[in-house]
Image: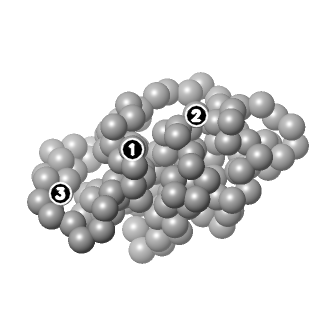
Amino acid sequence: MQLLDLGSRKAHYFETMVSLADLKAGSKGQAVLLKPEEEAEELRPFMASLQLVLLQFPTFRDGRAFTQARTLREYLHFEGEIRVEGHILPDQADFLKRCGVDSVVLEEGSDPALWFKRLKSFSFNYQSLLEGS
């Protein structure tokens, strides 16, 4: 697994990833996988113990992870790492960063240079970045 850092937070490795259902059932975990169909708001009771939330893109056209990331940062004030995985394109790098995403799990054979090039392609934005991005 190759991780690409987008934000100011460094990517961390966690041996155990739990699901939202596991958290609700009483499992303890610092890293949680939030599926696209699950609401970020459901993580509110667990915010104090979480250090990583992993969001998924089942296809590059499915934007629910953008909404989940934005909700975690802006409304739930999550200060841990937000990571994304799945079908993500380098063209989406700036949007991911602007939504508060810290790291991307790159698919096997992906070129990180393409991601960095996309991040540098916008010198001006009309909307401000989320704090910590």
Q: Front-most of 111 and 44?
A: 44
- The three-letter amino acid code for the residue at tag 3 is Arg
Of callouts 3 and 2, the N-terminal one: 2
- Tag 3 and tag 2, C-beta contact below 8 Å: no
- The three-letter amino acid code for the residue at tag 1 is Gly
Q: Front-most of 8 and 66?
A: 8
Q: Where is mark 1, residue-wise?
A: 132
- The image shows residue 126, relative to residue 9, as above or below, that is below
Quadrant in which residue 113 is drawn: top left
Q: Where is mark 2, residue-wise?
A: 51
Count the numbered circles shown.
3
Q: Where is mark 3, residue-wise?
A: 118
- The image shows residue 93, relative to residue 46, as above or below, that is below
- The three-letter amino acid code for the residue at tag 2 is Gln
**What is the spatial separation of the Cα atoms under label 3 and label 2, in whole angstroms?**
27 Å
Q: Secondary structure at mark 1?
A: loop
